[in-house]
Image (spheres, helix red, strand yellow):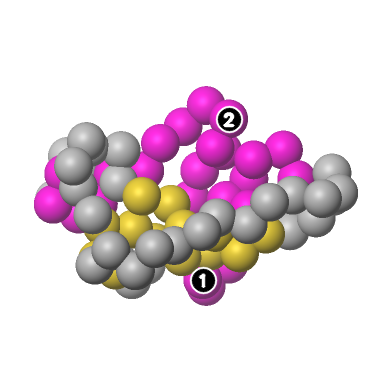
Amino acid sequence: MKEFIDNNDEYIPSERKYANEILDVRIYCAVKGCNYYIKGKEAYNGVFLDELGNYVADLRSQEWKCNKHSNNK
């Protein structure tokens, strides 16, 4: 999974119009002040898949942390 750094590019999140719509989204690191994010798709019920189609998180109850802040080193 490739991580990116937000350099104040004024990202505007997509807004869901239909319940079954799949959105292109960014998921930012859960650590306050961190600018790292990953790209992917948010599907039905908060399921987030990264760019390669790998399951990353259920956005209703989970968070994502970048490699720098993750305990999985």
* Residue 18 picture location, percent across and down: 86, 49
Q: Which residue is drawn at 18% across and 42% down?
A: 33
Span colored in magenta: 41-69
Question: Left of 66 or right of it: where is 58?
Answer: right
Q: In the rendered structure, are the residues bearing label 2 and label 1 in contact, judged by CB atoms less than 8 Å apart?
A: no
Q: Judge whether residue 35 can be spotted in this image.
A: yes
* Residue 57 picture location, percent across and down: 50, 43
Quadrant for residue 69, please give it: top left
Quadrant for residue 35, please give it: bottom left
Of callouts 2 and 1, the N-terminal one: 1
Q: Which residue is drawn at 43% across and 52% down?
A: 27
Which element is circle 2 on?
loop
* Residue 22 picture location, percent across and down: 74, 58
Residue denoted by label 1: 51
* Residue 52 picture location, percent across and down: 52, 73
Q: Does the magenta stretch include residue 36?
A: no
Q: Which residue is drawn at 48% across and 50% down?
A: 56
Q: In this view, does 31 lie above or below 20?
A: above
Residue denoted by label 2: 60
